[in-house]
Image (cartoon, helix red, strand yellow):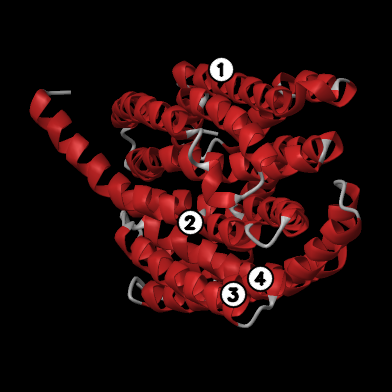
């Protein structure tokens, strides 16, 4: 591709990635805010939040197929010039989100506390986890509606509107949590209600924004729902496998000890903030690859992929160095417990070192999402667990490995995932029909 065209491509990628980057930085602040506010209430409260957040993260990641599949489908259809069909895909996603959201709410409310107990919740920790989960269940339909709305807008190459909506929702969350937790002294319950209120605001704003993108509105046919659910099932299995690694890591930490569990919660939330920040380049990768394939231009998709991967590696080095340098300081934001701070510093150093692997994994993920190669994403995530399980087993057998064993296991998991996805992308078989 000529140098001038490459420069134009760079501008398109950066123009879409920068707002997505800001959005992805802000999104984990729901949990970061909860962790910072609740962490100063005590170890039991922070441990309870760790278990509740693990359950909710698994639910949120599993439901994220609404965003991922919708982004790919809308981008592909717009690449074909079929804007009315892109609208149909969005309406289908919203309909599924509303129906599924009610079921997810019931799941969180009734099954969430037993899951937290199975992960190691006992006594005061289990009580706090149960309180948080019962309240958080109310927000599940609104969370899923926001995911569908994000997918619709991203498919239209709009990452600025989701950024504005997420910023507003997080401001609501921070203000309400401070008022309810510290002002009204409602503890973990106040933190949960603040997050629910933010989710309601977010869903309302996404629905309003999506209405401005409607072209040729019509009721989706049954095949639209079948297509979304079929693609969604592959992504759900993929996400369950992803969540299995992180949930197991938390369960191992809980069995090692309360200080390790609290330190792991801090490290995990920073990891989600920093590593998922690198996912910003996966957004233009997904959108532009989908549009290129919709327009029958696979070579453009290859060029987009190469550039996104290079940019991801550069960004990951910066993130890695910053995380390692700040690892002794960051734990002070979350806890006054000296033992927890010391343990979290070790976890954060490993967290920083693995950022280049995280960048490659996320970008390859976005590229193959854009190619709608959902079966490969599912298979790769399942196989990547083989890079994590040995470290988890060793840490359970030898608690002295502690947070080091847990986070080395997560590094092995990322390495395996990156290798499998890179081989698939390099083969170009994703560009073949069927």
Q: CA distance from mark 4 to mark 1?
A: 38 Å
Q: Quadrant of the C terminus?
A: top right
**Residue denoted by label 1:** 419
Q: CA distance from mark 2 to mark 4?
A: 16 Å
Secondary structure under tag 3 reads: helix
Secondary structure under tag 1 reads: helix
**Residue denoted by label 4:** 192
- Name which of mark 4 and mark 1 comes first in the sequence: 4
Q: In the rendered structure, are the residues bearing label 2 and label 4 in contact, judged by CB atoms less than 8 Å apart? A: no
Secondary structure under tag 2 reads: loop
Residue 242: % across, % down: 67, 38
Residue 182 numbered tag: 3
Residue 119 appears in the picture as rendered: yes
**Which residue is located at x 59 percent, y 67 percent?**
143
Residue 27 numbered tag: 2
Nearest the camera: 357 or 222?
A: 357
- Name which of mark 2 and mark 4 comes first in the sequence: 2
Q: CA distance from mark 4 to mark 3?
A: 13 Å
- State the residue lying farthest toward the bottom: 184
Nearest the camera: 289 or 313?
A: 313
Secondary structure under tag 4 reads: helix
Q: Nearer the viewer, mark 4 or mark 3?
A: 3
- Name which of mark 1 and mark 3 comes first in the sequence: 3
Residue 326 numbered tag: none
């Amino acid at each position: 591709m000529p140098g001038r065209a490459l420069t134009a491509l760079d501008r398109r990628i950066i123009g879409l990635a920068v707002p997505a980057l800001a959005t992805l930085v802000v999104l984990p602040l729901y949990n970061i805010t909860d962790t910072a506010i609740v962490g100063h209430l005590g170890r039991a409260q922070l441990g309870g939040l760790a278990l509740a957040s693990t359950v909710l993260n698994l639910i949120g990641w599993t439901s994220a197929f609404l965003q991922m599949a919708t982004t790919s489908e809308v981008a592909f259809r717009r690449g074909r010039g079929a804007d009315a069909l892109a609208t149909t895909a969005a309406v289908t996603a919203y309909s599924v989100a509303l129906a599924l959201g009610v079921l997810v709410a019931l799941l969180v409310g009734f099954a969430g506390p037993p899951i937290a107990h199975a992960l190691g919740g006992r006594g005061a920790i289990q009580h706090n986890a149960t309180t948080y989960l019962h309240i958080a269940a109310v927000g599940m339909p609104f969370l899923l509606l926001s995911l569908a709305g994000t997918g619709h807008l991203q498919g239209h190459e709009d990452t600025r509107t989701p950024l504005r909506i997420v910023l507003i929702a997080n401001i609501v969350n921070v203000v309400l949590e401070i008022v309810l937790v510290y002002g009204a002294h409602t503890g973990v319950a106040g933190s949960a209600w603040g997050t629910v209120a933010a989710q309601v605001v977010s869903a309302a704003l996404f629905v309003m924004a999506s209405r401005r993108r409607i072209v040729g509105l019509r009721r989706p046919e049954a095949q639209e729902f079948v297509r979304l659910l079929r693609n969604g099932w592959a992504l759900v299995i993929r996400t369950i496998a992803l969540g299995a690694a992180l949930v197991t890591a938390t369960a191992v930490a809980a069995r090692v000890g309360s200080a390790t569990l609290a330190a792991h919660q801090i490290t995990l939330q920073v990891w989600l903030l920093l590593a998922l920040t690198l996912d910003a380049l996966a957004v233009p990768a997904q959108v532009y690859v989908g549009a290129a394939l919709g327009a029958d231009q696979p070579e453009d998709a290859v060029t987009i992929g190469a550039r996104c991967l290079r940019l991801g590696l550069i960004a990951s080095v910066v993130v890695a160095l910053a995380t390692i340098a700040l690892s002794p300081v960051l734990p002070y934001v979350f806890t006054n417990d000296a033992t927890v701070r010391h343990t979290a510093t070790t976890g954060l150093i490993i967290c920083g070192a693995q950022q280049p692997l995280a960048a490659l994994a996320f970008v390859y993920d976005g590229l193959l999402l854009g190619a709608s190669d959902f079966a490969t994403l599912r298979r790769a995530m399942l196989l990547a667990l083989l890079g994590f399980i040995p470290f988890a087993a060793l840490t359970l057998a030898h608690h002295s490995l502690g947070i080091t064993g847990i986070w080395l296991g997560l590094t092995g998991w990322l390495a395996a995932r990156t290798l499998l996805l890179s081989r698939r992308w390099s083969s170009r078989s994703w560009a073949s029909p069927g």
